Each structure stands twice: as C-alpha cells, then as structure tokens.
Amino acid sequence: MKSSTPRHGRGAVSNAASRYSGTTREAVDDGWFPEEPAALATQVGVETSRSVIARNQSPDLPFDQSLNPYRGCEHGCIYCYARPSHAYLGLSPGLDFETRLFTKPDAPQLLEKELAHPNYRCSPLALGANTDPYQPIERQWRITRQVLEVLQRARHPVTITTKSALIERDLDILGEMAAAGLANVQVSITTLDKALALKLEPRASAPHRRLLAVARLAAAGVPVKVMIAPVIPWLTDSEMERIVEKAAEHAAVSAGYILLRLPREVESLFAEWLNAHYPLKAAHTLSLVTLAHGGKIYDSSFGRRQVGSGDYAGLLARRFLLALKRHGLTAELPALDAGAFRAPEGKQLDLFR
C-alpha cells in the first residue's frame, strides 16, 4: 500500500515517523496488498499530568492560559497546526495524530486544585486551543463537561473553540455561565462544501450542523464568534463572504479568519493531501501560501503568522472587512468577567499532601 493512499474517514494520507524517532519507516507498494487500505481504528490511552493549565505570552492569542482535555484529535483536520506536537510522544503527526489519542481523566480534579492555589490569578481559560475539546471521544469520556462543571462552580470565565455540534450537549452549563458573563464560544467553519469538508476534516461535524450549533448557542444566550479557520488559498478562499453571511443568518455576534498555517510536518502532510485529492490545484495553492508568507511556506512571526502579508493577504483582509460591514458583524465577543471568580474551598491543603 502506498503511503499516499487516502483512507476513508481519515485526513492524513501518510504516517511518517516522529522527527525524534531513531528509526524511519517507508511504505512500499509491492503488489501484494489490496487497493483499498484497511480501516484504522482509534486507540485511546490515558495520560497523567501534574498540572493541566498551559500558559502563553503570545500577542497573537486573546488568552494567556488554556486547558486541553485530550492530546491528538480524531477530527483529522489535515491542516491542524497541533499535529507536530504528537512527535514529542514519539508518534507520527500524520495518521497517529488522529488515531492514537490520549485522554486526561484527572483534568477536572487537577484544575480544581490549581484554581484553589493561593497564588492563582483568574483570567479566561481557553478550551480548544490545541485540540478540539468536543472531538468524538468526548461523548464517552465527558472530560470537557466535568471541566466546565468545575469552572461553573468557581464562577471562572471560559472561552471555547470547536468545530463540533456536540457542544450543544452542554448548553445547560454554558447558558448559565454566559448569563453571568462567564462564557463565550468560537465555532470554526472552514468551508460550506460538505464534500470538501469530508476530505479536509473528516470526523468533524458537517458545516450545516456547525451553523445550527451557532444558532442554538445564540438562542441559549451564549455569544458566538464564527472563525473561518483556516482560509486555504485557491481551495476555500472564495467562500469567505458566504460564510460571513451564514454566520450572520445564524445569529453569530462576530466573525474572524486565520490564513492557512503550515508549521513543521504540517507542510508535507498538507502537500501530500493536496496531491492526493486536488492534484490540479496543489501547485497553485502552495504558491499562494508562499506568496502570503513573505516567500516562505510558513512565517512564524507574531502579527503575520495568522493573517499573512503582501498583496494576496491584503486582498483577503479587505474582502473580509467588507463582508463584516455588509452583514453587521463588526462587533467583538463581549469581555468575560474575571472578577466573579471564587476559589474552590477546602482544596489548598491538598496541594501539599
């Protein structure tokens, strides 16, 4: 079986070894295997941690602390910038990233202890900064919901980014928190084309279900921002205005976009995917990505890595601004209330046992 053969329900078309691995593997088509590759089952392991809150000082991010209930993501989005993180586990950022997942079942308890620490300073906690907190295994593990229950009891502000309609399950918690100024949500919509979405992000909710989730969150009083993330040159960029229009129709209060980013292994994985699914568009798409990042396939500079630079990036920015004005989505999500926080009681001594 060739390494570039797409698998049904999976995003990556290869599984190159981790960059930290001492050995390498190469798939070879010797004519003995069937043309259809065998299905890959999802494997779930348990990860133990000493802490669950990650902190950052990036000027590109609207939050300084985040929590990820899962490592790896079954959604299988080929463009996911989190894929390279799987290499630190000795696993591939390719198929391993979407099939070999890790849960953090003690995350709610660890979070409660960290919130109770005397030196803790409250600021909005982001869920979904790395991998989706509502990916399919959340149905069974329910770690995200337990984390929300801890935050609700502590009156701690939370912001969630997802591309899953499973978030509707937690409308009871999110509605109450939003009414107190403690919750908002960003729903990511890359394309409205269902056939394209099945290839780009094979196990995420269909585009129309995400839009319905936007409407249901809004009806429950939860402020929602639709993120067109990522905008892919020559593949999805023509949909920008239509997605903004749909966001407004489904009661989003705001919208934003992020230009395609291809850090580390994501570059080769995305190029493989393009050549497997859209070979006639591959060269032009990658050339526009390079054009928008100053002649490089990826520019990690703050202020440019998410929106790009140059003529093509400037055109996207102007188109997006006009679409926001046309559909009345120029507002930002309302600020969350960090002053309402109440540290969990009776937990401080647990830290020193």
Image: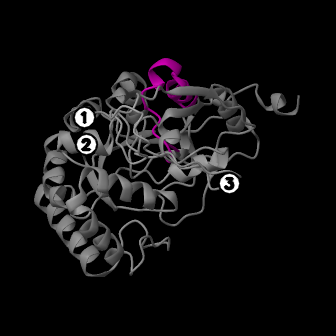
Residue 188 as seen in the image, left or right of residue 239: right
Residue at image position (53%, 21%) is 141
Task: Name which of mark 2 and mark 3 comes first in the sequence.
Answer: 3
> Mark 2 highlights which residue?
197
* Residue at 18 percent of width and 53 percent of height: 244
Q: Which residues are magenta?
A: 126-152
Residues at badges 1 and 2 in contact (C-beta under 8 Å)? yes
Residue that carries the numbered disc 1 in the rendered image: 206
- Residue tagged 3: 20
Looking at the rendered structure, the kind of residue marked 2 is: Ala
Q: Residues within 10 Å of mark 1 (few under 14, many from 20)?
A: many
Give the x, y percent position of residue 56: 60, 57
Q: Is residue 293 magenta?
A: no
Secondary element at tag 3: loop
Given residues 283 and 135, the one toward you in this image is: 283
Relative to residue 233, is residue 192 depicted above or below? above
